[in-house]
Image (cartoon, helix red, strand yellow):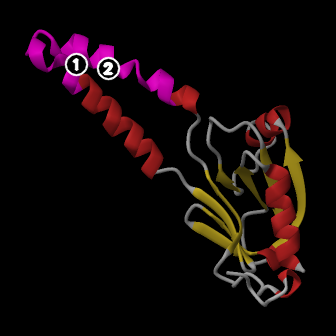
Amino acid sequence: MTSDVPASSAAPASPATPAYRERLVPGPGLFLALLLLVPAVALITTPINAALAIPVGVLVFLIAAITLLLLAPTVRVVGDRLVAGHAEIPVAQLGDMQLLGSEALRAAIGPGLDARSFLLVRGWIHRGVKIDNIDPADPAPYWIITTRHPQKLADAIRAARS
């Protein structure tokens, strides 16, 4: 069945539809390293009950992996707001943005960090965005958010401003 509506007249995205959305889940390397829990727990459990050693190790791995997945924060640009984890700010209160590679991110969250800044940093993501906060009532001078797609996040914030 074909539609009579031309493609160019499609309805714009609703304000509730995110212009950008990324879940900051760990990469596969962390889950592979987490597999080391299975033999470690099995080694500890073997003297207690050898038959349960491997199943308990697998269960501990699954609990740890599911916990990491469930607790992974989300970065979104929805309507005129940037939502990073549980924090949100109107994009009108955001100033200049700086894309951070791994070295720049390390410097920004290390020696160059202002203790009042807002951070949403995950150690398994090595790129990010530093966004100036121009709200005079907010004590945080800037936000640093790690993201796998810093350019897409910056573009979504710029698009939400206009």
Quarter-of-image position of residue 39: top left
Q: Amino acid at mark 1?
A: Ile
Quarter-of-image position of residue 125: top right
Q: Which residues are magenta?
A: 31-56
Query: Does residue 46 appear in the picture of this structure?
Result: yes
Q: Which residue is at a point 11% across and 12% down the rendered structure image? A: 50
Looking at marks 2 and 1 on the same chain, the residue that comes earlier in the sequence is marked by 2
Seen in the picture, residue 62 relative to 83 is either above or below; the reply is above
Q: Quadrant of the C terminus?
A: bottom right
Question: Decide: marks 2, 1 in contact (CB < 8 A)?
Answer: yes
Q: Which residue is at a point 80% across and 34% down the rendered structure image? A: 102
Assign a secondary structure to mark 2.
helix
Residue topped by disc 2:
38
Q: Position of residue 13 (x, y in %)?
A: 73, 81
Other-residue count near label 2 (Cα within 10 Å), few / some / many at <14 / 14–19 / ≥20: some
Q: Which residue is at a point 49% across and 22% down the rendered structure image? A: 33
Q: Position of residue 51 (x, y in %)?
A: 10, 16
Assign a secondary structure to mark 1.
helix
Seen in the picture, residue 11 relative to 27 is either above or below; the reply is below
Residue topped by disc 1:
54
